Image (spheres, rainbow, N blue to C red):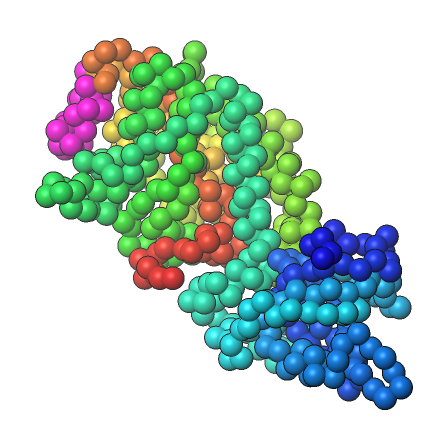
Amino acid sequence: MYQLSEIKNLSVSNEQEVVRLRGRVFSKKDCGRVLFLILRDGIDTLQAVALKQRESVSTPLSLDDYNVLRKIENESFIEIVGKVYCAEKPVLACSQKSIELEINSYTILSRSVLDLPITLKEASITEEKKNDNPQLPSIQFFKRLDNRVLDLRTQLTQSIMRMNDGFLFYIQKYFRENKFIEIKTPKLIGGASEGGADVFKVDYFGKPACLAQSPQLYKQMAIIGDMKRVFEIGPVFRAENSNTNRHLTEFVGVDLEMVIDQTYMEVVHVLYAMFVYVFERLSETYKKELEIIQTFFDLPQLTLASELVTIEFSDAVALLRAHGKEIGDFDDFSSEDEKSLGAIVKEKYKTDLYVVTRYPSNVRPFYTMPDSQDHRYSNSYDFMLRGEEILSGAQRVHDYVMLTERVAALGIDPNTIRHYLDAFKYGAPPHAGAGIGLERILRYFLGLSDIRYCSLFPRDPKRLYP
């Protein structure tokens, strides 16, 4: 038996070699004496050719085998043994444009039904093709999500999921190289981790509990336990009834916490260096995937300044007012405010990535350290990418008395976070951290229209299946 090969590893150097491949039948074209079949494996495609048996002409396939292959349903999973040939002219419909495969034999490993709820051919229609021919069929986004298993097979979704994996790989690599320890915190907890009401409540053997909104309290407790630099990548749950293209009720959170020496800006610089590192590595490693995504979405070139651009909240408010926006001194930014600020900063500083610091204390969680010079503001920061918030972070209150006062002032029941509060009785080092939504970063990095493209099986207020 021939060793199993992959479409992506073949080239003209394999000419005349017999190879064994597996993949899905993407499409077929029967020309009477010749059958052209496109075999798909992930984002890679190859044209396979079957010759029809005729009198006085010997072909590898019998007439019966040819007819079975001619009628096989698209999306069926098959194995083909065949000889590699250089194509007489470029095969424009395939990723392998210079070669094709003459089929010697095949095995049907799993047949698909004939009537698919969505067809991958329709799902593969790019915006460019749609603009050239408005009559081409299109699939509604919600129908794609309803049939996510089929949608995952498309080149677009395959490329996005590979980029998702790349984000995780390079984020973990960066943190480990910078002496962070990866931790895993509980997702079943006895009280709201963010001090709010947007939690999914569960019955925990007769006791009230909820799904964690973040690992915030536990990663701080890890710092108090003298783990100086920690990070976690895991699920986050938010019971926010927000039916928008930027919210999920369950997403992948990337959280970090670290001891600081002099100022919370130490964390800001660590995070900025991480984003620059990850963005550069992704752009270098996933060129093919980026090209595919670019055929479906307008993917503007990401622009980064040579140095970190930071803007204090009060200065950001002044910039918005100078451009006609009405906003109070201590009002949090709306999504429209963030977009407007992004456009202003892009024009002024020539960057898509920047940081807003010193948010008002009244719009930050109870554990956020107030500014020592003006308690109306806080030692906090948000990272913005293409005019959208992708990260929120701050220095944390590390004094037990101050922390309990903050809890009382915000009306939080201290008993629900007693273990967290008690940890500060034993002494806590100054520390700061941040929380990042993986799907949100991916969406704005790639310029996608909806965050649900970035989740394997997305969850929103109206979607609990598949």
Residue at figure coordinates x 74%, y 84% from the top left: 63
Q: What stretch is highlighted in magenta?
A: 401-422
Q: In this view, does 390 lie to the left or right of 395?
A: right
- Location of the C terminus (image quadrant): bottom left
Q: Quadrant of residue 129?
A: bottom right
Q: Is residue 198 above or below residue 142?
A: above
Where residue 432 sits: x, y (%)? Answer: 38, 22
Magenta region includes residue 416: yes
Residue at figure coordinates x 33%, y 59% from the top left: 464
Where residue 54 sits: x, y (%)? Answer: 83, 86
Furthest toward the left, the residue is 206
- Location of the N terminus (image quadrant): bottom right
Q: Is residue 396 left or right of residue 197?
A: right
Q: Is residue 124 left or right of residue 8?
A: left
Q: In which quarter of the image is residue 457?
A: bottom left
Residue 454 in sight from this viewpoint: yes
- Total count of labels: 0
Furthest toward the front, the residue is 1
Magenta region includes residue 389: no
Q: Quadrant of residue 261?
A: top left
Query: Which SS does the magenta portion mostly show?
Result: helix
**Viewer-closest of 186 and 250:** 186
